[in-house]
Image (cartoon, helix red, strand yellow):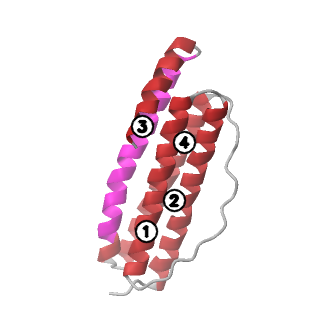
Amino acid sequence: MQIGKTIQGAMNDQIHKEMESAYLYLGMSAYFSGTNHPGAAAWMRAQAREEIGHAMKFTDFVEDRGGSVVLRALAAPPATFASPLAAFEAAAEHEAVVSASINALFELAAKEKDYATQALLQWFITEQVEEEKTSRQIVDTLRTIGTNTSGLYMFDRELGRRGQAG
């Protein structure tokens, strides 16, 4: 069944949001590189790659259903943050916004009785639970570390492990 115009438009909006996420995380990676936090930089770079993958899932889905993908310009992400904690707080807030967007898209798909889109979005809903959990845990850990430079150094190394695996 071909994708409806309303869902196609909403999916194009979501593709844009996923690319904005990738751009945000790439910007955060650059911030962390510039502040000598290579582990956090690697973690954010891996996160950016993951968000591009999400955009591609939406793109493939729209195209597989006979729809058209319309890409829009991306605004520049923030280049600096007050601290590593502030950057990860911004990331956590951003993940909550993405979750709300996915949930609204699911509600629209339910209203439109678009079962294929609902099935796709179920994966994203589950993914967002994990994304929000991970970002909250990082924020909580950074709050616990506070200004302890040794603790921050060790945690940065831990964050870098994800970048090596991703």
**In the image, what residue type sits under mark 1?**
Phe
Front of the two marks 4 and 3: 3
What amino acid is found at the position of numbered circle 4 in the picture? Answer: Ala
Q: Position of residue 136 (x, y in %)?
A: 45, 35
Left or right? Give the position of 4 relative to 82: left
Q: Amino acid at mark 2?
A: Glu
- Circle 1: is it few (<14), some (14-19), or many (20+) Cα within 10 Å? many
> Residue 71 is drawn in which quadrant?
bottom right
Q: Find the magenta span and give its range.
A: 118-146
Query: Disc 2 or 1, which lies upstream in sequence?
Result: 2
The first of marks 4 and 2 along the sequence is 2
Residue 148 seen in the figure? no
| Secondary structure mostly seen in the magenta stretch | helix
The number of callouts visible is: 4
Q: Are marks 4 and 1 in contact (CB under 8 Å)?
A: no
Q: Which mark is residue 58?
A: 1
Report the residue at 44% width, 52% height from top: 50
Report how far apart the C-alphas of labels 4 and 3 lie in the structure.
20 Å
Q: Residue beneath label 3, please?
A: 164
Residue 87 in the figure: left or right of residue 80 = left
Q: Position of residue 116 (x, y in %)?
A: 30, 75
Q: Nearer the viewer, mark 3 or mark 2?
A: 3
Give me the C-alpha separation between circle 4 and circle 2.
Answer: 13 Å
**Marks 2,1: beta carbons within 8 A:** yes
- Reading the image, the residue beneath label 4 is 91
SS of the residue under disc 4: helix
Name the residue nearer the viewer: 129 or 74.
74
